Amino acid sequence: MKIALLRHGPTEWNAAGRIQGHTDIALSDAGLAKMSGLRLPFVHPRLYASPLLRARQTVEALGLADAVLDARLMEQNWGAWEGLTREEIFSRHGADAFEKAGSREGETFRPGGGESTGELHARVAAFLKDVAQGEGDAVAVAHLGVLRAAYTMATGWDMATPMPADLDVSKILLLRLDRQGAAKIEALNMEFAIAGPAARPSSRRS
């Protein structure tokens, strides 16, 4: 079966370069407008989403419904690093802060006292394995860390190095899963469809 993973729309913290993690930030007005103008380019019999507000708002803005909320799709918990910019983290924790949080040491290193890369990978892998047991293809509205983890599982990328240039997390990552949830890349950087003229940006913050 296939699963399409997509990141939530932009937030004000994204624009400011602040680490969000589990902090429950809403989409910005620009983020709502952007996602309301897009639609998925395929039929999706099953829909899953992170329970964080920015993901739920993205589901609504895309015109989707009846998403199963799954905490395994939440962003990595960055603990005390949440709300900080990369520059602030570098100044406080050193220029190798994100390298330590990557896959080489990330199995045990918990940035800001939050969640390790190994723990993130384990929950994303468990989600993919469970989804693979169901019938029909699926869509998951999630976060940057989840897309990076899924890409890593499919390619073996070392998350301690810069994000691969061929992975555009503003687009759709399509994976093919076997029955055990093992992933292979089906398509990178799938484009969204453009919504029809009836679509309007939502101002809801629920």
Image (spheres, grey):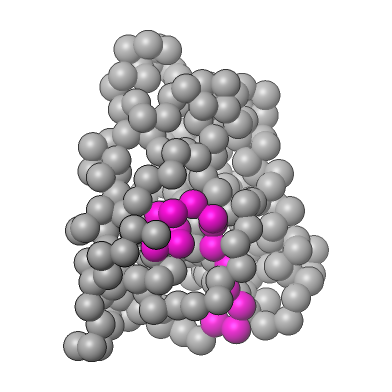
- 56 inside magenta stretch: yes
**Residue 67: within the magenta?**
no
Quadrant where the N terminus sits is bottom right
At a point 25% along the width and 65% down the height, the residue shown is 203
Q: How far across and down, in percent of the image, does residue 3 sit?
A: 59, 71
Residue plotted at (44% across, 39% down): 23
Q: Is residue 49 visible?
A: yes
Vertical position of residue 44 compared to residue 11: above or below: below
What is the number of callouts on the image? 0
Q: Residue at x 58, y 53 (%)?
A: 73
Q: Estimate the x, y position of residue 17 in percent, counting from the top left.
A: 28, 36
Is 2 displayed left or right of 35 in the figure?
right
Q: Position of residue 13 (x, y in %)?
A: 29, 40
Height in image: 70 above or below 199?
Answer: above
Determine the image quadrant of residue 175.
bottom right
| Residue situated in front as seen by the camera: 187 or 24 | 24
Q: Name the image quarter holding the C terminus.
A: bottom left
Q: Quadrant of residue 63?
A: bottom left
71 sits left or right of 75 in the view: right
Residue 181 placement, left or right of 39: right
Front one among 107 and 43: 43
Q: Residue at x 27, y 70 (%)?
A: 202
Pick the residue in front: 164 or 49. Answer: 49
Q: Position of residue 39 (x, y in %)?
A: 35, 79
Residue segment shown in magenta = 44-57
Q: Left or right? Give the position of 126 relative to 199.
A: right
Residue 147 is at least partly visible in this image: no
